[in-house]
Amino acid sequence: MHIIVVGCGRVGSELAVTLEAAGHSIAVIDKRTAAFGRLPESFGGQTVAGYGFDRDTLAVAGVERADALAAVTNGDNSNIVTARVARESFGIERVVARIYDPRRASIFQRLGIPTVATVAWTTDQVLRRLLPDQAHGEWLDATGTVALVERAIPRHLAGSKLAQVNRPGSWWLTTVTRLGRAQVTTDSLVLQEGDLAHFVVAVDQAAELERRLTNKEQ
């Protein structure tokens, strides 16, 4: 694949090097030529000085033959404009934009532009380390609204069926690992103490899920 990386900061340079090592053709765009100093001397991809949303700059980077583009500068607006130009003007299907503001990320997601909200991801990672005993996300969607959490089934829920545990619209138990073997849940599955469960949960309902798992009287 030919992939364009817009932004040669810490994320962009690491992304470019990783993709090249995987055998892809890479073009890196940055408005500052000094930024290319982050790339190792062994980097064999193309470097282009300019703005990622500029069509002439994109043309030099090989946008006409590009299979994917990642906009990872430190500016939300630049990343979104770049992603939209790539998608709407050049028809690149695999486009992703880095977004710092998680509230804006949800808006751009609705426009059909996949985003990575770094603030939401970082917050989640910090919470996992501050509160290791609580349920935390193994995965968080780009808008920070839906997560996948891992939790051991407590004793008081042993013998329960899925209908007793699931809450449609809030959380859903999707897989269970029992004695080292993972399985997708079925309606007939009966939970056992020590099962390792993965829930898909709305982030604003995560605390309620935790209460459900810890409150023996529910």
Image (cartoon, grey):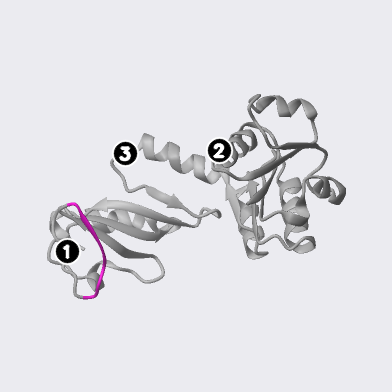
Instruction: Confirm whether the magenta stretch covers residue 183.
Output: yes
Task: Estimate the spatial distance between the alpha carbons at disc 1 and disc 3, rounded to whole Å.
Answer: 23 Å
N-terminal of the pair, mark 3 or mark 2, is 2
N-terminal of the pair, mark 1 or mark 2, is 2
Report the residue marked by disc 3. 132
Residue lying at 77% horizontally and 60% vertically, measured from the top left: 90
Mark 3 falls on what kind of element?
loop
Report the residue marked by disc 1. 191
Which stretch appears magenta? 180-187
Name the kind of residue labelled 3 in the image. Pro
Q: Position of residue 29 (x, y in %)?
A: 75, 39
Residue lying at 62% horizontally and 60% vertically, measured from the top left: 109
Instruction: Confirm whether the magenta stretch covers residue 148.
Output: no
Mark 1 falls on what kind of element?
loop
Q: In which image quadrant can residue 206 be found?
A: bottom left
Q: In this view, does 215 lie above or below 36?
A: below
Q: Where is residue 12 in the image (x, y as percent from the top left)?
A: 64, 37
Mark 2 falls on what kind of element?
helix
Report the residue marked by disc 2. 21
Of circles 3 and 2, which is in front?
A: 2
